[in-house]
Amino acid sequence: MSELRKLKITEMNRLTVEEFKEVDKLPLVVVLDEVRSLHNIGAVFRTSDAFLVNCIYLCGITATPPHPEMHKTALGAEYTVYWKYFKCTQDAVNELHNDGYTVLAIEQCAGSTLLDELVLEKGRKYAIVLGNEVKGVQQEVVDMCDGCIEIPQFGTKHSLNVSVTAGIMIWEFAHKLFKLR
């Protein structure tokens, strides 16, 4: 039987804040459309840091750093991951399209692509839009997107928490985009 030992922080060879800011990021932007929970926002920052997300767009009622409640889950990632604020999510989507991003809503829609069937292309830039905890991604924003991705679910609930959804989606994009590098 092998010996399992938890690593010390000094053994993990993590990037410094300065190194993080200079390292080549994934061609992925996460858009938060009217997300109200500071826990969810902080968790998205922390996950985005872990997987080298290029930027987070905070839209509408979504809070912006610094905020002590956000920091509880972000644990400093709100200072490493680049972010921008937009009053209107549609303006964020327009900017992303103008910058050559393929914008995908994470939503249960007619004609959505199931996550396990998602194929990404080398050389393309992607943005994923996650919506409000109750209402999801605004229909006006869905209408502007290039497609929708849906996480297959098999139980009685119709949705996952925003931070859980973000973790699943960011991991899946990172996993696929790292392979395409």
Image (cartoon, helix red, strand yellow):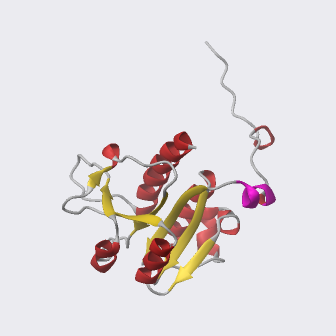
Q: Where is residue 28 in the image (x, y as percent from the top left)?
A: 53, 59
Q: In which quarter of the image is the C terminus?
A: top right
Q: Nearer the viewer, residue 181 or 150?
A: 181
Q: Is residue 155 above or below residue 137?
A: above
Q: Position of residue 172 (x, y in %)?
A: 45, 47
Q: Which region shows up in magenta?
A: 18-23
Residue found at the very far top of the displayed protein: 1
Q: In which quarter of the image is the N terminus?
A: top right
User: Magenta stretch containing residue 1, yes or no?
Assistant: no
Q: Where is residue 27 in the image (x, y as percent from the top left)?
A: 55, 57
Total marks shown come to: 0
Residue found at the very far left of the displayed protein: 110
For the point 43% across and 80% down, which residue is it? 89
* 77 displayed left or right of 8: left
Res 36 visible: no
Main secondary-structure element of the magenta-colored stretch: helix
* 25 displayed left or right of 157: right
Q: Is residue 156 above or below residue 141?
A: above
* Quarter occupied by residue 10: top right
Q: Where is residue 164 in the image (x, y as percent from the top left)?
A: 43, 55
For the point 66% across and 77% down, which residue is it? 66
For the point 75% across and 58% down, which residue is it? 22
Res 33 visible: yes
Q: Is residue 107 above or below residue 172?
A: below
